Structures are given as C-alpha cells and as structure tokens.
Image (cartoon, coloured by chain):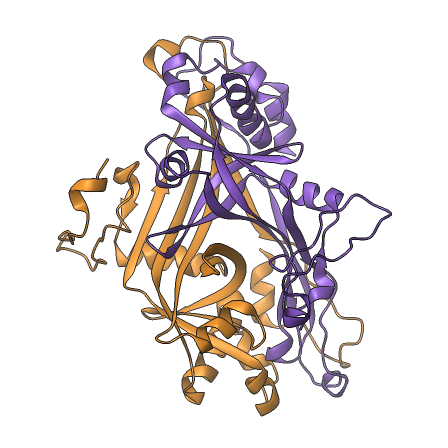
Chain colours: A orange, B purple
Amino acid sequence: MQGSATQGTRRQPPQHRAAYTPTDRTVPTRSADRASYDKDLVHSVLDEAYVCHLGFVRDGAPVVLPTLYARVGERLYVHGSTGSRPLRMTGRTDPGLPVCLTVTHVDALVLARSAFHHSINYRSVVVHGVAHDVTDPEEKRAALDALVDHVVPGRSHDVRPANNKELAATAVIRLDLDEVSAKARTGGANDEPEDLSLPHWAGVVPLHKGYDTPIADARLAPGTELPDHLAVLRG
Amino acid sequence: MQGSATQGTRRQPPQHRAAYTPTDRTVPTRSADRASYDKDLVHSVLDEAYVCHLGFVRDGAPVVLPTLYARVGERLYVHGSTGSRPLRMTGRTDPGLPVCLTVTHVDALVLARSAFHHSINYRSVVVHGVAHDVTDPEEKRAALDALVDHVVPGRSHDVRPANNKELAATAVIRLDLDEVSAKARTGGANDEPEDLSLPHWAGVVPLHKGYDTPIADARLAPGTELPDHLAVLRG
C-alpha cells in the first residue's frame, strides 16, 4: 500500500523514542500498522532469540541459512567456520556482503471462524545491510564471547576461552543495526461481523517455549556441578 | 570442503531410500556429514513446523521474510495478500521468482567445556527453486485448506471456507521440492580430549515446545465447544 509513494524517500521517525529511520525496504507493503522502528522493541526481539535466518545472494539466487547471532549495542555478529559460504563470501567481497538477517518469534496461533482470518501472533525483526569481516582481534574475541553469552548469559566466563588455532578457524562478520524494522501481530481473531454467530470456535492458542532439565555429559570432571547460569534455564 | 570438487556435478543419491538429488547448492561446504537428501527426513522436518523463512532477491539485494507454508506431496505452498512483495513479484516475474525457503527446528543447546565447541542441536531444511503463482482455482483452494490444516490438522473442515472476494485477495505461490537438503546436528558436546578434565559443566539442554490452554474469543456463539482438533494441541 505504501509502496510507490515512499520509493526512495526517508520518512521521519517518531521523535519521542529512539528509532531507526524507515526506508523503502523497511516499510512493508502490507499491514504497515504492524511495523515499528522503535529501538527498544527491536533490541528486545533480537535479544530473546539466538537463531536468525541469514539471507545473501549467490550466483544471482537467494540463499537463506539458519545461524547463531548476538547483539552488541547497535551491531549484530554472526560467526562460523572460515570455510562456510556466507563467511567466506564476506571476506572476499569488497566492501562486504549484502545480507538480510531476520529473527522471528511465534507467540500464538490465531484461530478465526473463517479460514481467511486465521493468523499467527508473532514478533519479527528484519535487518538489511552489508556484512563486514571482523578482523580486529579484540572485536573478534568480544564478539565470540557475546555469541556464547547471547545463548546462555554468563556462560563465557565459565568455559575455556578460544585459543589462537580456534580463533583462526572461526570467522566473524558484523552487521550494523541501521536499516531495521520490527513487525508484530498481537490480539485475537479479526472475524467479519457477519461471521460472529457461526458455530465455529475462535480464539488464541499461546505457544509455550522453555527448557527441559539439562543432561550432563557422562565424562564431567569429578565434582563439577550445574552452574547457576544453567540452573536459571530450568524454569 | 566439498566445494570445488562438486561444482556443477550431480552426485548419485543413496539408492535404498527415496532421496533428492544433491546439487552444488545443496551440498554444504561445511559439516557435509550433517547433510541429508532423504525424502522422509525432509518431509518430517517440513511437516513439524509451519513458519518458514522465505528468501528472494529484490533490486539485487536479499530479502528474508517469515511466512506460513504447507506441504502437499512434493510441493510447498506459501500464501499472502496479493499486495505483499514476494507474492506480487512472483505474479509479475516470468517464469517465476527464484526463492530459497528455509525451515529450522532448534532442539537443544549443546554446552561444551570450551567456548569453541558450543553448539546447537537443530534440524533444518533448505529448498532452492523457482516459485510460481498458483492460478488454477482448484489447486489454490486445496493449497489454502492445506495451509490451515498444516498449522492445526483438521481445522479446515470446521471453519467458514473462503468466499470469492477472499480468494481474489489472496495470492498463493508454489515451490516444487526438487533441489532440497536437510541438515541436522544431534548428540552431545564434542570437546577436545585434553579439555575433558576441566572443571566446566558440559552437556545438553533440551528445548521444550508446546501449547498453553486455548483462550476462547469472548463473543463465541452460544454452545460452541473447543473442537477435538484443538483439544489435541493442549498436551
């Protein structure tokens, strides 16, 4: 709906809260009322997940791969083997690899009286930008710690840190949070008024996500207890 | 690791089970031992989820959007408003829109004694191909039923079907399962032998996913009970 009118123009974000500047790519053509550029919302969606779907173009065709990520301020980091395709391509591409990084939480099924109004409550963040190889050793080490701590907060202080060989085998890429939007659907079914009297159940089925009891490796060193940062996950 | 040796060649799949033929795009450069082309495995990963991440190329840059999908045999269907970008682009692109459709289940956190060997147990499917607009009314209606039933099996028989206006407002695209791979990691931490005596906890933390109690719409028609197909979700 907004498509052609906003081509190439930058809209003014709301001034009262820190927000990303909308662009043609981050203003959806549909359900624009569900879109947000609020930094706090974007950060909260990014920080609640740790697996993203990273898109890039290879030989003119799209590729989408799941991968771990972490946020440090206004930067996202993705890591992998130096041999993996997107990381290898980033190192070889000047000035970096155009990517789209997307994170999605599914919160509930929305069941309506009509097939047409079935939906999903979700929160997603889409980040457009150019990924750059992280070559500074200090930034790389901090990013790798962040990647471990993003999955389990506090974990990086209770493991053997990467040695030089491991650091050399790991590539890290950085993506600045600049062209970013969040999108969310909340609430119940939006049935047509004339459908309300139909005898079909309608409502919301919330999804439940959590962790089961940790399963210790059979060869733990004697006396090794479950650390606090993992006990927290059990709830 | 397999990269250059397999460029452009099609490998022979195992003959004992139905399998997709590997291609350069579906043989990973890393952890090729985690890749599979087994149709049963691919189908099971696809059928357990209902949100995918759909990648396409717009103005030369990648775009990745979360969306619902359904599988019918060897075809995947994605639907949306006729105004949404990938669906509009598919209808306007001859002979279809190159896409990459990826589905990921995160099954467990894998915590190792070393930062380097931290990992995730997951199952993912990556589908490369060209998406086509579904114009046949019968195929479109069947695809829309499948999209509802893919989220909640049996649901399409207990709702008001789409009317002509709703059908006209909905676009459906089809992606054949042809160039497909699954990838999975299972098992515990792969620590280095010399790290086994370190006093760090290692093991696996399984993820738990399920549904909470359905919340009925406040305006249900009198006497409308929770149907069996939803009661099943409560477990």
The N terminus of chain B: image quadrant:
bottom right
Residue lying farthest right?
B16
- Left or right of residue A181, residue A114 in this image: right
- Left or right of residue B214, residue A211 in this image: right
The C terminus of chain B: image quadrant:
top right
Q: Is residue B227 above or below residue B106?
A: above
- Left or right of residue A27, residue B221 in this image: right
Residue located 40% across and 36% down the image: B87
- Left or right of residue B195, residue B62 in this image: left
Residue A161 showing in the rendered view: no
Indicate the position of residue B17 as horizontal and vertical percent values: 83, 45
Residue located 46% across and 39% down the image: B96
Residue located 50% across and 56% down the image: A63
The foreground one among B67 and A106 is B67
The foreground one among A48 and B147 is B147
Indicate the position of residue A175 as horizontal and vertical percent values: 37, 69
Identify the image quadrant of residue B229: top right
